[in-house]
Image (tube, rainbow, N blue to C red):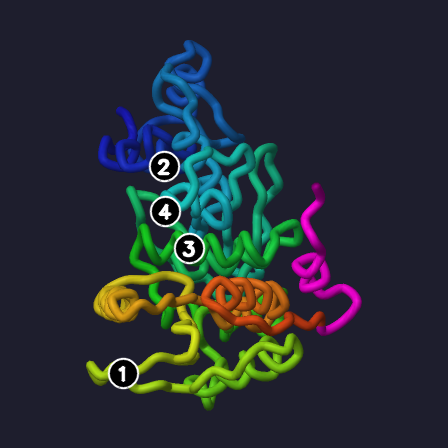
């Protein structure tokens, strides 16, 4: 007798010794199939019930079964199943509940979690999308740019939402990019509407000698512009989200088109840029203003300010 076909089928042909015995096979029958090569051992007590290729999917299921009940794919392995990445990670990371200590096996990395939220994707138990994104963003060798790009990709390609990401982030008090990701997601607490405008004035405009911009400027079509310089026809809009979708996307682009029809140019920036790279923003705004007639001088805010390079004459 073979293990129930449905069990092996949903596990990409992989079964455990216990599953085979529960299906009515004897220890001798299992050994005989392994001896003849009808089955292939993947890990101790975990077998592929065919002579086929041991694919990544087979390795993933073998890792899950080796780690026992409650295990799920995590980190890069989960990201691959969620289709956030295209490469098949060589090491398969498996999440298990805190307190579990599966025996280490080659090619499998175990991460223990007090809070493990799972979903089933393509038949695999995996950490839910928001948890996968926030997990990967916390890797030691990852950069902030990597973390923000991954969050954007998750929201654009899959069903991650700002609320889900923020909920997951709120459970990680020690997350290495916690503050920066909240800014990237547009979550800046009380005063969320006025804070970016204040940051623009205090971090970009005043330290670099740029002309003043009107805040929350009303347009003839009843829309509002975050920051506006009517003299030079330059608008500044702060995007709170690292992704764009739905009505907000279309509304913003419609407003940009109407501004262009009035002969105005719109520059977009994020909370994260205002916090992390205000000097770079100052250079971009200054160059845009200069192209539209501003004759003022960009002022470096310190010895390392990029404005120094922007003021240098080009090399002949």
User: Looking at the image, which residue is at 39% across and 32% down?
Assistant: 57
Find numbered disc 4 in the image and state the secondary structure of the residue it sits on. loop
x, y percent for residue 186: 44, 74
State if disc 2 and disc 3 touch (CB < 8 Å): no
Name the magenta segment's main secondary structure. loop
State if disc 1 and disc 2 touch (CB < 8 Å): no
Q: Examine the rendered structure and indicate whether residue 7 appears above or below residue 110.
A: above
| Image quadrant in which you'd find residue 30 | top left
Find numbered disc 2 in the image and state the secondary structure of the residue it sits on. helix
User: Which of pointers 2 and 1 lies earlier in the amino acid sequence?
Assistant: 2
State the extent of the magenta-drawn residues as a range: 301-316
Q: Nearer the viewer, residue 297 or 150?
A: 297
Residue placed under numbered mark 1 in the picture: 219
x, y percent for residue 231: 42, 79
State if disc 4 and disc 3 touch (CB < 8 Å): no
Q: Examine the rendered structure and indicate whether residue 186 appears above or below residue 106.
A: below
Q: Is residue 137 visible to us here?
A: yes
Separation (CA) of disc 3 from disc 4: 10 Å
Q: Quadrant of the N terminus?
A: top left
Separation (CA) of disc 2 from disc 1: 69 Å
State if disc 4 and disc 2 touch (CB < 8 Å): no
User: Which of pointers 1 and 3 lies earlier in the amino acid sequence?
Assistant: 3
Separation (CA) of disc 1 from disc 3: 46 Å
Q: Quadrant of the C terminus?
A: top right
- In the rendering, which numbered label is found on residue 82? 4
Front tag of 2 and 1: 1
x, y percent for residue 82: 36, 47
Residue placed under numbered mark 3 in the picture: 127
- In the rendering, which numbered label is found on residue 19? 2
Find numbered disc 1 in the image and state the secondary structure of the residue it sits on. loop
């Amino acid at each position: 007798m073979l293990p129930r076909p449905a069990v092996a089928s949903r596990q990409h042909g992989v079964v455990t010794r216990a599953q085979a015995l529960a299906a009515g096979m004897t220890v001798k029958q299992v050994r005989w199939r392994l001896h003849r090569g009808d089955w292939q051992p993947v890990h101790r007590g975990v077998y592929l019930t065919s002579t086929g290729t041991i694919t990544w999917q087979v390795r993933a299921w073998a890792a899950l079964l080796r780690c026992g009940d409650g295990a799920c794919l995590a980190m890069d392995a989960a990201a691959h199943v969620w289709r956030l990445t295209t490469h098949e990670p060589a090491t398969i990371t498996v999440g298990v509940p805190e307190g579990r200590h599966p025996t280490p096996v080659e090619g499998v990395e175990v991460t223990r979690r007090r809070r493990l939220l799972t979903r089933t994707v393509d038949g695999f138990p995996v950490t839910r999308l928001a948890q996968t994104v926030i997990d990967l963003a916390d890797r030691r060798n990852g950069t902030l740019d990597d973390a923000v790009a991954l969050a954007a990709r998750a929201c654009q390609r899959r069903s991650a939402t700002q609320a889900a990401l923020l909920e997951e982030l709120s459970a990680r008090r020690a997350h290495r990019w916690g503050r920066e990701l909240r800014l990237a997601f547009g979550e800046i607490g009380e005063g969320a509407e006025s804070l970016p405008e204040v940051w623009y004035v205090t971090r970009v405009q005043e330290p670099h000698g740029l002309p003043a911009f009107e805040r929350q400027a009303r347009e003839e079509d009843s829309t509002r512009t975050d920051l506006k310089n009517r003299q030079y026809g330059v608008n500044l809009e702060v995007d709170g989200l690292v992704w764009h979708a739905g009505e907000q996307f279309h509304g913003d682009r419609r407003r940009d088109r109407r501004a262009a029809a009035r002969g105005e140019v719109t520059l977009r920036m994020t909370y994260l840029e205002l916090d992390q790279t205000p000097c770079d923003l100052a250079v971009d705004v200054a160059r845009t203003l200069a192209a539209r007639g501003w004759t003022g001088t960009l002022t470096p805010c310190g010895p390392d300010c990029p404005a120094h390079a922007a003021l240098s004459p080009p090399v002949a």
